């Protein structure tokens, strides 16, 4: 296929459910090559249908196991499922360290499931810059549900909110997660809490602590209408997974009833537009005409000839010249 790839044909094939076409489109998105704009333009008319569910939490809480269990549950309902597993980047190749099929081998041969690992490429937020476009690929390809499993890197887990319709935060007993949830601001982003590994000692206490903190938060914010449920699971055995699906369904119904789904998606699009615009500006900083590039302005600031604000003004003026 190579450079002669017909993007429109590729999108048509992806919409027919051909895995290779879906994989090729995501690769084009990840590579950020000259066809990226063409891919985005071809995908646009076919997006906006998939339910996007983000799963996040600290390492060791069982995110991959829970994701796999949710895939099984959605497939039992006859829904097509996409999974984007956002992994740490390899310091050598920039690729994902964990392979697609290693993580969820039981679903690898299911034509109704598409699983893709994506590298964070050094992005501290845990989400690759290409993930929003990859979501559009899976949406256009007919996925009813797209699960985004994030790497789980502490406070920057909150970035999953910018992508998901529903955010599921996983915790496990015995890891101090209740306290960490409050510290990391996770209470602010979770739509559903899942206490996984609930067969371990301390699961009831963790769930109780979460419910207490949720009730405290509701007293402080009277405008919040949705009360995040706390669901206990043993994902490795499938216990409680149906309850998680029910909680996600209930949240989606609430989003529709209150007009919040459209508002969330509009905020998501606005953030993406802003990121693209900022990147375009940043790419132009070094190549301005007349010797007024970023490096030249920095030298003048160091020399005391300009203050940083005046230098920034000149930089922006140069971009518009």
Image: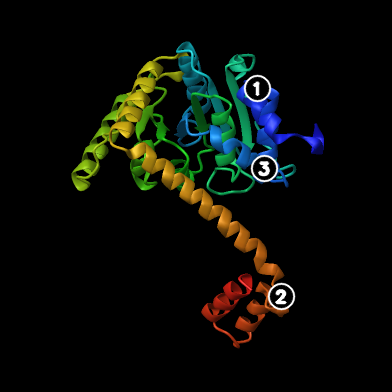
What secondary structure is marked by label 1? helix
Percent from the top left, x then y, of residue 194? Answer: 38, 28
The reply, left or right, for residue 107 in relation to residue 219 is right
Query: Which residue is labeled 3 in the image?
Result: 38
Q: Residues within 10 Å of mark 1 (few under 14, many from 20)?
A: some
Q: Nearer the viewer, mark 1 or mark 3?
A: 3
Nearer to the camera, 90 or 206 = 90
Name the image quarter holding residue 35: top right
Q: How crowded is mark 2: few (under 14 residues within 10 Å), some or many (20 or more)?
A: few
Q: Which residue is drawn at 70% across and 29% down?
A: 9
Percent from the top left, x then y, of residue 149? Answer: 52, 32
Q: Earlier in the sequence, mark 1 or mark 3?
A: 3
Q: Residue at x 61, y 15 (%)?
A: 111
Percent from the top left, x then y, of residue 176? Answer: 38, 37
Q: How crowded is mark 3: few (under 14 residues within 10 Å), some or many (20 or more)?
A: few
Q: Earlier in the sequence, mark 1 or mark 2?
A: 1
Query: Which residue is labeled 2 in the image?
Result: 289
Query: Which residue is labeled 1 in the image?
Result: 101
Can you say which quadrant of the picture contains the N terminus? top right
Task: Give the alpha-carbon distance from disc 3 to disc 2, as whole Å.
Answer: 29 Å
Task: Give the alpha-carbon distance from disc 1 to disc 3, as whole Å.
Answer: 29 Å
Q: Do the residues labelled 1 and 3 touch (CB within 8 Å)?
A: no
């Amino acid at each position: 296929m190579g450079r002669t790839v017909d993007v429109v044909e590729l999108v048509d094939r992806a919409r027919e459910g051909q895995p290779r076409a879906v994989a090729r489109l995501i690769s084009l998105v990840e590579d950020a090559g000259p066809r990226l704009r063409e891919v985005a333009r071809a995908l646009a008319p076919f997006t906006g249908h998939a339910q996007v569910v983000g799963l996040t939490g600290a390492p060791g809480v069982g995110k991959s196991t829970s994701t796999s269990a949710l895939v099984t549950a959605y497939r039992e309902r006859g829904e097509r499922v996409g999974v984007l597993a956002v992994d740490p980047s390899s310091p050598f190749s920039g690729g994902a360290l964990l392979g697609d099929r290693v993580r969820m081998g039981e679903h690898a041969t299911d034509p109704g499931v598409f699983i893709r690992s994506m590298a964070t490429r050094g992005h501290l937020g845990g989400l690759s810059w290409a993930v929003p476009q990859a979501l559009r690929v899976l949406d256009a390809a007919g996925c009813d549900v797209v699960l985004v499993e994030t790497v789980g890197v502490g406070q920057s887990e909150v970035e999953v909110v910018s992508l998901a319709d529903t955010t599921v935060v996983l915790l496990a007993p015995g890891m101090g997660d209740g306290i960490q949830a409050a510290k990391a601001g996770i209470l602010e982003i979770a739509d559903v809490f899942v206490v996984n590994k609930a067969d371990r000692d301390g699961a009831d206490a963790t769930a109780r602590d979460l419910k207490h903190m949720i009730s405290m938060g509701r007293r402080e914010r009277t405008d919040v209408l949705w009360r995040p449920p706390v669901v206990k699971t043993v994902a490795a055995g499938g216990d409680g997974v149906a309850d998680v699906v029910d909680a996600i369904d209930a949240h989606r119904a609430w989003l529709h009833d209150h007009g919040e789904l459209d508002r969330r998606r509009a905020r998501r699009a606005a953030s993406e537009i802003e990121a693209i615009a900022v990147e375009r500006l940043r790419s132009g900083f070094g190549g301005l005409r007349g010797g007024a590039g970023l490096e030249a302005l920095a030298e003048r600031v160091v020399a005391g000839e300009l203050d940083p604000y005046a230098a920034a003004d000149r930089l922006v003026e140069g971009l518009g010249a």
